[in-house]
Amino acid sequence: MAADSLINWGLLSLNAPGWGGVLLQGFFNSIQIAVGGFTLGLALGIGGAFGKLYGGPVLRDLLECYTTVVRAVPELVLILLLYYAGTDLLNQVLALFAIGPVDISGLMAGIFVIGVVQGAYSTEVLRGAIKAVPAGQIEAARAYGMSPTKVLRRITLPAMLPYAIPGLSNLWLIATKDTALLAVVGFSELTLVTRQAAGTTKAYLLFFLAAGALYLALTLVSNVFIGMLERHARRGFAVQR
Amino acid sequence: MKKALKVLAVATAIAVSGGVAASAEALKVGVAAEPYPPFTAPDASGKWEGWEVEFMNAMCAEAKLECVLTPVAWDGIIPALTSKKIDMIISSMSITDERLKTIDFSDKYYNTPTGIIGTKGVDIKPTPEGLNGKALGVQVSTVHQAYAAKHFAPAGVDVKEYQTQDEANNDLAAGRLDAVQADAIALKAFLATDQGKECCDYKGDVAEDVAVIGPGVGVGLRKGETELKDKVNTAIKAIRDNGTYDTFSKKYFDFDIYGD
């Protein structure tokens, strides 16, 4: 059985001495960060897009700075900056108010950094999508006497969705992979536990392939949901070939 | 506004209670988040084990401290200590003058020679001349990196830095390096693996340089926490005296790892 000696599948079993359980736990942590970061990013993006489109000059300039700076600095640098320098700064500020030190966990730091980065990109994606909504629809809504929030909820957000989904789904897939960057601060997400498992067992090929398969599975499942969402958002549109 | 104030008050209360609770609760002991056998390595259930984990348990039990092992990236382990993400470093960190500028150390708890391993059959000596023109791997921000930068790099040795010891060892096995410098015990543990047996052998210890390599490995502590430092030092002495240290060390080593 040459194949058996080449790859020891037993190492992937869920219970010790297999590393499958550790890998899945890391995978779960990665998904948590991706979901949290993407959600935060979406919230920042919606706020940012509307601020850029309808805000005053000061707000617009501030948002311009945010999207430019965040998109210019590598995520890796931002993560290191926030995780080490950010915590230190936060604690010094809190100490001024005589509040004890807080600990930013790897999970919170990860969600925050990926959220801030995603927020900058999704601001631009959503801004483009909102501008693609025919102005007449929004005018018509105003003519009916809808309040700005009602216009947002009933017209702008649903109408821009078909234009935003391709960009946002890209961002989601990027978010799932950006979680790997958290490995540098020692947070036990999928990439770090894979490296530990591979380093300890020396079965590099097996574990990195397994990690790759998990990331791929996440993308494939995501694609199914994105497809469903897109079909729903585009209902009533002429079918494009 | 009222609501916002309420939220702020609750958040403050949580932060304060969290801060107070943390000081009375367990101490977080930072260990490099990488396999570094036989000192610290995760097992298949994600639990950390090795000589240093046993040392931590014995020392903390003796000092009546509650310690929780917390994996941190090696190259960020000192910032993690100073920014209070962890309270102690027990991760084979050598006591050096350079590090003493930023953090404090307990007394040493082990001391082992620094050695060099290299590809089998290649003529390498652990001296600047013996390594001339060769590629030498070291782990980043270790005493070995400092030593190689001081003694080997000026003598025409191509010093390459790696994030983890494991990566340096792998590149040696893969043939991208001619030699690796590290702690002699960690290297011998690597040579005992199948991969290590096949590719490499021990070339010898490097010449002493206490100024760079330091007097041994100590528990890393924040500056100014003398109370904790005293507790740790007393506990190290106690487990040395009452034989606990020798008992768990025998499981891993057939010599006295404490050095002299």
Image: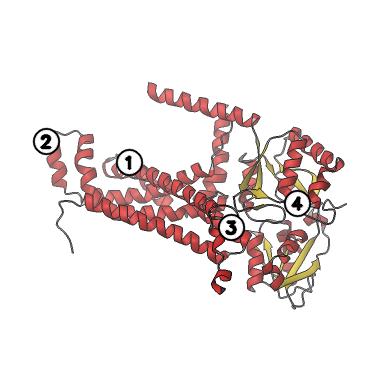
Density class for disc 2 (Cα within 10 Å; few <14, some 14-19, many ≥20) is few
Residue drawn at point x = 65 percent, y = 49 percent = B48
Q: Amino acid at mark 1?
A: Gly
Q: To which residue does mark 1 refer?
A: A47
Give the percent coordinates (x, y) of residue A55.
29, 40
Residue drawn at point x = 74 percent, y = 68 percent = B117
Q: CA distance from mark 4 to mark 3?
A: 26 Å
Which chain does the residue under circle 1 lie in?
A: A
Q: Amino acid at mark 3?
A: Ala
Which chain does the residue under circle 2 lie in?
A: A
Give the percent coordinates (x, y) of residue A21.
53, 51
Q: CA distance from mark 4 to mark 1?
A: 50 Å
Q: To which residue does mark 3 refer?
A: A197
Density class for disc 4 (Cα within 10 Å; few <14, some 14-19, many ≥20) is many
Q: To which residue does mark 4 refer?
A: B94
Give the percent coordinates (x, y) of residue B57.
72, 41
Q: Amino acid at mark 2?
A: Tyr
Locate residue B172 relative to residue A95 in the image: left or right. right
